[in-house]
Image (tube, rainbow, N blue to C red):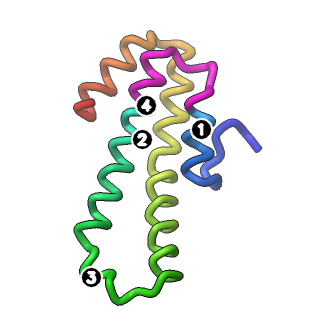
Amino acid sequence: MTLFDSTESPERTHSALAGASLVGTGLNLMVTALHDRVESVRRSELERFRSKLSRLDDTQLDAVETLTKDIVAKLLYDPTVELIGRSRSLSSERLTDDLRDLFDL
């Protein structure tokens, strides 16, 4: 397995990111904040659709939970890897500022 594997669970990808030595501390915090914000949106949207999901049994609800987590992980994977790659040649501070501005973190 590589350090960041888009087929891994979101938790494992997030854990690998948190421990990545390639990322400056500020950038690491911003990427983590981005992941946290997207996870918050995911949970909020599931809550918003709670009444529509009420007919699902526990197995189906677990499938929806897993599906939405996997979608989020896959959407964040490439940008996260790109940021890590760019942190090797660009200023971590610049990347941190860009992330903060782009996603209002």
Instruction: Name the secondary structure under disc 1.
Output: helix
Q: CA distance from mark 2 to mark 1?
A: 11 Å
Asked whether 81 or 51 is in front, the reply is 51
Query: Start and end of the magenta stretch?
Result: 18-31
Is 3 left or right of 34, judged from the image as shown?
right
Q: CA distance from mark 4 to mark 2?
A: 6 Å
Is the residue under label 1 in contact with that under label 3 (CB below 8 Å)?
no
The residue that mark 2 highlights is: 35
Image point (56%, 30%), residue name:
18
Image location (x, y in percent) of residue 4: 64, 40
| Label whose residue precedes the other's in the sequence (3 or 2) | 2
Q: CA distance from mark 3 to mark 4?
A: 32 Å
The residue that mark 3 highlights is: 52
Count neighbours of disc 2 (C-alpha within 10 A) and say few if under 14, some if 14 to 19, many if 20 or more: some
In the drawing, what numbered circle is on residue 24?
none
Tell me: residue 49, above or below residue 104.
below
In the drawing, what numbered circle is on residue 31?
4
| Label whose residue precedes the other's in the sequence (4 or 1) | 1
Residue 53, located in which quarter of the rendered image? bottom left
Residue 74 on the magenta span = no
Which amino acid, by three-letter code, is at mark 3?
A: Lys
Instruction: Name the secondary structure under disc 2.
Output: helix
Q: Quadrant where the N terminus lies?
A: top right
Which amino acid, by three-letter code, is at mark 2?
A: His
Q: CA distance from mark 4 to mark 1?
A: 12 Å
| Label whose residue precedes the other's in the sequence (3 or 4) | 4
Query: What residue occupies the far bottom of the structure in this picture?
Result: 55
The residue that mark 1 highlights is: 15
Instruction: Name the secondary structure under disc 3.
Output: helix
